[in-house]
Image (spheres, rainbow, N blue to C red):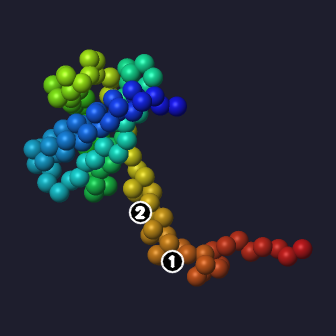
Amino acid sequence: METQRQKKIAGVIQKDLADILQRAATDGGMQGVLISVSKVYVTTDLSIAKVYVSIFPNNKAAELLEGIKSNEPLIKHELAQRTKHQLRRIPVLSFYLDDSLEYIDNIEKSLKGDENPIENPELLPKRKKS
């Protein structure tokens, strides 16, 4: 169960990180890449923030996530500068790929595509009538 304080800190981190990461991508010559921070979970002792990033287009995601992870100290420093009046200590940032958009996309594709068991009953295993 998240406390109000955890939610508030997560919200502050989420808003600023989204801005930092999107600006870094744009400045780094990655035009047309969208990076959004979909969720931030802060541990109860406020020492660790799990940051879930959503990257579009998806084929750049793994490479970009590595870049984000390797620049964690710089990102943390930038975050500290922006939040120094709100947060006393910046939690350790650990970044994860949020693949829920890809998951939703796959569901949509299979609903629209040939894999629809309603339109193609052969996909369903044959049931024995006993």
**Residue 80 appears in the picture as rendered:** no
**Where residue 43 sits: x, y (%)?**
43, 25
Q: Give left or right: position of 82 versus 8.
A: left
Nearer-the-camera pick, 19 or 106: 19
Instruction: Kindly identify which numbered label has been placed on residue 39.
Output: none
Which residue in the rendered view is the most extreme toward the bottom?
A: 119
**Where residue 48 sits: x, y (%)?**
38, 24
Q: Mark 1 packing: few (<14 Cα in 10 Å), some, or many (20+)?
A: few
Q: Mark 2 packing: few (<14 Cα in 10 Å), some, or many (20+)?
A: few
Q: Which residue is mark 2?
A: 105
Marks 2/1: CA–CA distance: 15 Å
Amino acid at the residue labelled 2 = Asp
Q: Give left or right: position of 40 versus 106.
A: left
Q: Which residue is mark 1?
A: 114
**Residue 47 appears in the picture as rendered:** yes
**Where residue 5 sits: x, y (%)?**
39, 26
Amino acid at the residue labelled 1 = Asp
Nearer-the-camera pick, 97 or 37: 37
Q: Quadrant of the C terminus?
A: bottom right
Q: Residue at x 26, y 22 (%)?
A: 87
Q: Residue at x 54, y 73 (%)?
A: 115
Local secondary structure at mark 2: helix
Residue 119, relative to residue 110: is it above or below? below
Nearer-N-terminus badge (2/1): 2
